[in-house]
């Protein structure tokens, strides 16, 4: 659990980037593609709720991605950004569910 909590902000960025090619590669199997998309969308929603709970309880989270000379990338999660992540994941997940129902009705 410590590994998850230490890298939580990065998981919310890396999981969609890693699952996009998987979704493209499963293009031939729409049922599998739909299941993967829904599981990943729900997982991201759960991780975003975990992020806002963690920020609420422990304060601001700063995640250092890399050090490139005198420049580096730092991902920071405060209450506003964590709230926006939850809102984004919720709207994305609900839009995903609606889109599958909408596309099946149109076909």
Image (cartoon, rainbow, N blue to C red):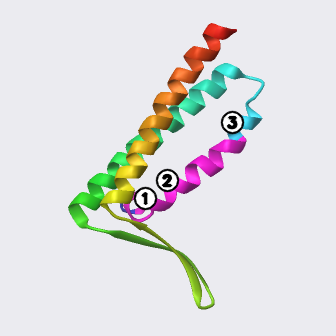
Q: Mark 2 sits on what residue?
A: 12
Q: Is residue 16 magenta?
A: yes
Bounds of the magenta segment: 3-21
Q: What is the spatial separation of the Cα atoms under label 1 and label 3, in whole angstroms? A: 22 Å
Q: Main secondary structure of the magenta part?
A: helix
Q: Secondary structure at mark 2?
A: helix
Circle 1 packing at 10 Å, graded few (<14), some (14-19), many (20+), is many
Which type of secondary structure does the marked residue at label 3 adopt? helix
Identify which residue is drawn at 56% across, 81% down.
Answer: 72
Q: CA distance from mark 3 to mark 2?
A: 17 Å
What's the residue at 57%, 55% (across, down)?
14
Q: Earlier in the sequence, mark 3 or mark 2?
A: 2
Residues packed near mark 2 inside 10 Å, few (<14), some (14 to 19) or many (20 plus): some
The circle drawn on residue 23 is 3
The percent coordinates of residue 3 (x first, y second) are 42, 62
Position of residue 95 measured from the top left corner of the image (x, y, whole percent)? 51, 29
Q: Quadrant of residue 103?
A: top right
Total number of numbered labels?
Answer: 3
Q: With respect to residue 93, does 8 lie above or below?
A: below
């Amino acid at each position: 659990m410590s590994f998850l909590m230490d890298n939580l902000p990065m998981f919310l960025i890396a999981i969609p980037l890693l699952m996009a090619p998987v979704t493209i590669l499963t293009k031939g199997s729409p049922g599998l593609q739909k299941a993967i998309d829904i599981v990943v969308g729900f997982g991201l929603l759960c991780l975003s709720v975990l992020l806002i709970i963690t920020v609420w309880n422990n304060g601001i989270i700063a995640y250092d991605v890399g050090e490139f000379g005198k420049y580096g990338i730092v991902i920071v999660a405060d209450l506003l950004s964590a709230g926006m992540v939850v809102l984004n994941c919720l709207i994305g997940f609900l839009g995903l569910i609606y889109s599958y129902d909408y596309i099946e009705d149109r076909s």
